Each structure stands twice: as structure tokens, then as C-alpha cells.
Image (spheres, rainbow, N blue to C red):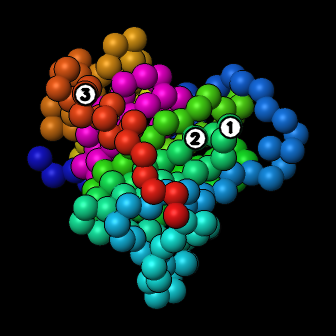
Amino acid sequence: MKLATCSPSLLFAVLFPFLSIAATTTHAAESEGPRATVTGLLGLAQVAHAGSPYAAVKVGTVLKIGDQIQTANGSAVDLSFGKSIGTVRLLQSATLEVTALSSTAVDLHLKGGELISQWKKQPAGSKFQVEVSTGIAGILEGEFRLDARGYLVLLEGTALFAETRGEAEPVVHTLKADKPVYFSPSEHAIRPAPKELQREVSKQLKAKLPKG
């Protein structure tokens, strides 16, 4: 089945009403906003700043809106958005673009490969979204893995996946990990995560990357 591309603005309109989450934060944290900073690097990665030529990534590199980062085979990069927000780890042979970055919105576009994340509960009205080829994942909080095809594994927390299906309106799937679950775009369904899959993702999340 061929999936048509749905505009990010339409998917945002579908997801945003579900993405209000209750939490508290300091005024300083709100005014500074999140920063996407490389805090761990295994192997090789490169970044293109808003259309500029690619350059090598190192610990301390800061990503801004429009930047695109790529990892080499056997490599991985940790991106920190702040201690009170969360981290995203881009796994090997992956491509990620930062499409929005503010005190209330973190939007990423996973163009290839996989990422994993430990995302913390944020203030009401905040959103964290990752666009992939089959829709957009909206993460409320928790531990998860997502690939560019739309396979979403949720070990803990709550997430949404707005799936595009041809010319129809996006279908929103709600994942609540009372027990680990995953969303399959090929089945268009949420399933219990097998033990082997749980162990695999948990191991990836617990692994530590070199800090410099």
C-alpha cells in the first residue's frame, strides 16, 4: 500500500489537542528554551548547519533549527535538550533534521535510521514530535525507540502516532505503556512488545556513549 505524504501542519493540528501535559518548571527554564547539544559521541557523525556543507560533529556541538545530523555505520550521537527535558540518541546510519526548537516545541524529522529517547514530562502546552515517512510521533513522556518507517516501541510513558493512510485524514493511535507496547505501520496496530524486543531497546537506552 502506498502512503501519501501528509503535511506536517495538518498532522500537528491533529496531534496538538492531545499534547497538553501537566507539569511545573521555572521561569528561567522557560525563557532560555531547550538547546540541542551533542553530549555523547561514538564513532563518526557529521552536521550541516542550515544548508551549509557537512562538518564533523564533536561533543559540545550545538544544533539549531534547519540543521541536519548524520551518523556513520557503527556510530551513535546523544543530543541533550536539557536536564529537565530529555535526550535523544541517534543510532547508526541515521539522518535527523531539527525543524523546530523552542521553550514549548521540539520538532524533529527522522529521515533515515533509528533514534531512542528518554523524554521527561513537560509543562502544559509543550510538545515533542518526530516526523517519519508514515506520519508523526508525538511523545508525551517516557522511554521509546522510533525508526524512519514509523515503528514505535514504547517501554514507559505515553505517546501518540498520527498515521497517514492514502488520501484519508491521519489516524491517531494512542500508546500507553502500562506494559511495553509497539506500533506497527505495516499492521496499522498497537501490539504488546515481545520480551526480546523489550530487552533490545532497554539495552540501547542504558548504553553509555563517550563524552569526549
Amino acid under disc 3: Arg
Measured in 3D between alpha carbons, the distance from the residue under mark 2 to the one under mark 3, in whole angstroms, is: 21 Å
Across and down, in percent, residue 84 comes to 68, 37
Q: Nearer the viewer, residue 70 or 14?
A: 70
Across and down, in percent, residue 148 comes to 29, 52
**Which tag is nearer the camera, tag 3 or tag 1?**
3
**29 is higher (above) or lower (below) than 72:** above
Left or right: 121, with 211 as reference point: right
Mark 3 and mark 1 in contact? Answer it, CB < 8 Å.
Answer: no
Q: Which residue was labeled with disc 2?
A: 86
Within 10 angstroms of label 2, few (less than 14), some, or many (20 or more) residues?
some
Measured in 3D between alpha carbons, the distance from the residue under mark 3 to the one under mark 1, in whole angstroms, is: 26 Å
Left or right: 104, with 110 as reference point: right
Within 10 angstroms of label 3, few (less than 14), some, or many (20 or more) residues?
few
Helix, strand or loop for disc 3: helix
Across and down, in percent, residue 132 comes to 35, 52
Bounds of the magenta segment: 133-158
Say the numbered circle drawn on residue 198. none
Q: Earlier in the sequence, mark 2 or mark 3?
A: 2
Question: Which quadrant would residue 36 be assigned to in this image?
Answer: bottom right
Residue 210 on the magenta segment: no
Please give the name of the residue rendered at 41% of the width and 18% of the height, measured from the top-left corner: 176
Within 10 angstroms of label 1, few (less than 14), some, or many (20 or more) residues?
some
Please give the name of the residue rendered at 37% of the width and 49% of the height, measured from the top-left corner: 115
Say the numbered circle drawn on residue 199. 3
Amino acid under disc 2: Gly
Helix, strand or loop for disc 2: strand
Question: Main structural element of the magenta stretch: helix, strand or loop?
Answer: strand
Q: Which residue was labeled with disc 1?
A: 84
